[in-house]
Amino acid sequence: MIGGASALGIGVLLALPAALPAAAAPSPIKAVRLGHALYDVGVHARITQAQARASARAGTTVPEYTASAKVGAKSYTYSIVGKNPAIKSSNPATTVTAEIVPLIMKFSNGDTWDPTKVDSCDPGASALTRTQNSPIVKSQAWKWGGTSIGTGQVTDAYQRADFWKYAQPTGINPKFGVTLTFKTLKPVTINVPNAQAAFASIGCGNKLLGLANINWLDPFLQKTVIPSLKSQGVGTTTFPLFVLHNFGEYVGTTSQCCVLGYHNTYNTAAGAQTYGLAMYDNSRAFGSGSSDISAMSHEVAEWQNDPDTVNPTPSWGHTGQVTGCQNNLEVGDPLSGTTFTDKVGGFTYHPQELAFFSWFYHQKPSLGVHGWYSDQDTFKTFASNCT
């Protein structure tokens, strides 16, 4: 989703009890029953719609196309990663270079969350290895509702199913899709200042869920971490995906907790830099709706469909994580917590179900496979107007 006024694409934001970091060291937070998801993030993308689309036209960001959808008398202009599936092309497929960046988060008292290490939350493999072997990275054949969607990554399958009218074998662009070519970079260690740190007790690993203030962490990624990765190939035409293990964020105050993933963009001299961040979750702190790659699949798909965090839609809400109203093309938010299973290499992953384009823009029939409004057919019609 896009948090605050309009800017940060937040994935899974769940309520934990208030964490109160002490002045000298991070303080534990009391374990109580989890509450409903929250959305106000208090930080904003450092880019305007005009800057983002100028960068796309100039080819100085990830490949994007810009089009518009009309709902009633109003037209909504949006930009999506890839090529326009509604325009016949001899080569409608798009490949984007993406980097997995493991983040090792350290507190001053020595507590450390390292996605490259195996722990008792999953003694079979590290969070990084699970991510590398997941359907976000690995291609496979997909069949939804008895229809073969094709072979690719889960977010590629979603994108094809979303625009099935054009991507089906008899459509004008049967080879349409968006493939991410991943490489894994060296881990980056981030020392979280005491004033920006908190944690909660969990039942595995080092028995702690780590937390950092997103209002500190996100600017730190933009100003320090992402520029430091330039020598490893990270740039405005690539998609860096930061991976954490059982480590999330709170929003300004620890009573606003916990963010499990987000995507964002900001303007640089070279163009618009998009990126994502997600927690690989086996903490068991948030229930089955946030297992393993659910937040990650949410964020990668939202980056694909709202890369610049500025795509407007008619107002929708009161579904998924959203208790109020939103008006953006954040395809994960309406179904946060709704996952399906996918077994890869003997391990069962839980990608999140995602809403289709036609759900947001009130299209009937839907462009999606089977005329669906979400990739596992949870939504039976387009979004209601939200007030």
Image (spheres, rainbow, N blue to C red):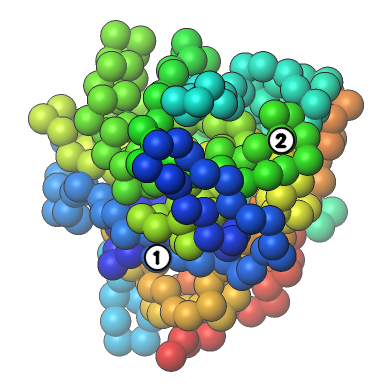
Point out residue 256 in the picture as x, y percentages from the top left corner. Answer: 47, 61
Task: Say which residue appears at 47% left-offset and 11% top-offset.
Answer: 186
Q: Give the distance between the C-alpha atoms of the residues marked 1 and 2, in whole angstroms.
A: 28 Å
The vertical placement of 149 against 63, above or below, is below
**Left or right position of 311 against 330:** left
Point out residue 304 in the picture as x, y percentages from the top left corner. Answer: 45, 45
Image quarter of the C terminus: bottom left
Q: Residues within 10 Å of mark 1 (few under 14, many from 20)?
A: some
- Where is mark 1, residue-wise? 40
Point out residue 117 in the picture as x, y percentages from the top left corner. Answer: 67, 17
Q: Amino acid at mark 2?
A: Lys
- Where is mark 2, residue-wise? 207
Task: Say which residue appears at 45% left-offset and 47% top-offset.
Answer: 21
Tell me where residue 318 sits by quadrant: bottom right
Q: Nearer the viewer, residue 273 or 57?
A: 273
Q: Residues within 10 Å of mark 2 (few under 14, many from 20)?
A: some
Q: Nearer the viewer, residue 268 or 321?
A: 321
